[in-house]
Amino acid sequence: MRRTDRLFDLIQLLRDGRLHKASNLAEKMEVSVRTIYRDMDTLVASGIPVEGERGVGYILRAPVFMPPMALTQVELEALHLGAALVRQTADPELQEAAERMLSKVDRAMPEPMFGGIDGFGKEIFAAPEVAASFAQMPIIRRAIRERQVLMIDYTTLDGRQSRRRIRPLQMEYWGRAWTCTAWCETREDFRVFRVDHINEALLAGQIFDEEPEKSLLEYLKRFEAP
C-alpha cells in the first residue's frame, strides 16, 4: 500500500472519535508500530487535528474537511435514503446531524437535484421497538465512543429485572429493534442487550482499557466457522 493511501485510511479509522492505540492501528494496517508513529507525526505536521502520544494512543478531536466531490443522481438518492433511516431510527443528536449533513450536501450541489429528501419516493416509519430505543441511544453511543463503563437497569425478554455493569462495544440495528453487544462485568461474559429493554443507563465514571479477550473482535470470533 502506498503511504498516501495508508495515511488516508488512518484518518478514516480515527474519525470515529475514539482513542486508538498504535499497536491496534498497526495490526489493522498490517505495518509496524514504528511506522504508525511516523505516520502520526506526518499527520500532525500536515495540520490534521490528531491528539495523543506514543504509548498512550491517538484520537481525532476536530472534524476533517472532505475535498470537493461530485455526486451522481443515484449516489445522492442513496445518501438521502441513508439519512432518512437515521432520522427515523436513531436518537435526536444523530437526527439533527443527518439534517445538517443533508443541508450541507444540497447546498454544495451545482444545481438543484430532483425533489430532495421528500422527492425520492421513499418514506421510513420506525417500529415501536425502535422508537423505544431512542432515549438510551445517546448515552450508549457516548460510552462506546469514549470506552466508558455503563450501569444499566435491564428487563429481560421474560420480564426479569436486573442491574448490570457493562462495557458497551457496538450497537446493531435488526430492522425492528436495536441491540447493544457488550462485555458484562456482572456476568463475566459477552451479552447482547435489547436497547428498548434498557430502562436506565448511567455512566459509571470509569474508562475501560481494551482487553483482547473482552473485545468485539473476540466476540465475533465465536461465530466463525470451525
Image: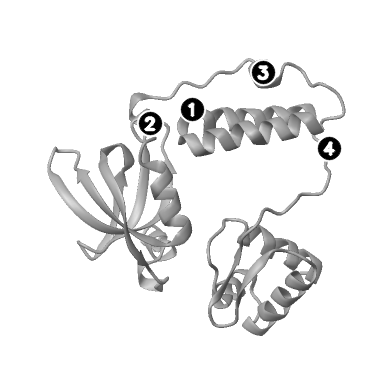
Amino acid type at image mark 2: Val
Q: Earlier in the sequence, mark 4 or mark 1?
A: 4
CA distance for labels 4 and 2: 34 Å
Instruction: Please report contact status of discs 1 and 2: CB closer than 8 Å, yes or no.
Output: yes
Amino acid type at image mark 1: Gln
Q: Position of residue 219 (x, y in %)?
A: 37, 61
> How many numbered marks are there?
4
- 175 lies above or below 24: above
CA distance for labels 2 and 3: 23 Å
Q: Secondary structure at mark 4?
A: loop
Q: Earlier in the sequence, mark 4 or mark 3?
A: 4
Of residues 109 and 26, the one drawn nearer to the viewer in this rendering: 109
Q: Secondary structure at mark 1?
A: helix
Instruction: Please report contact status of discs 3 and 1: CB closer than 8 Å, yes or no.
Output: no
Residue identified by numbered label 4: 70
CA distance for labels 3 and 1: 16 Å
Mark identifier at residue 130: 2
Amino acid type at image mark 4: Ala
Q: Earlier in the sequence, mark 4 or mark 2?
A: 4
Q: Mark 3, mark 1: which one is toward the viewer?
A: 1
Residue identified by numbered label 1: 88
Residue identified by numbered label 3: 120
Of residues 117 and 207, the one drawn nearer to the viewer in this rendering: 207
Of residues 199 and 12, the one drawn nearer to the viewer in this rendering: 199
Q: Position of residue 144 (x, y in %)?
A: 43, 56
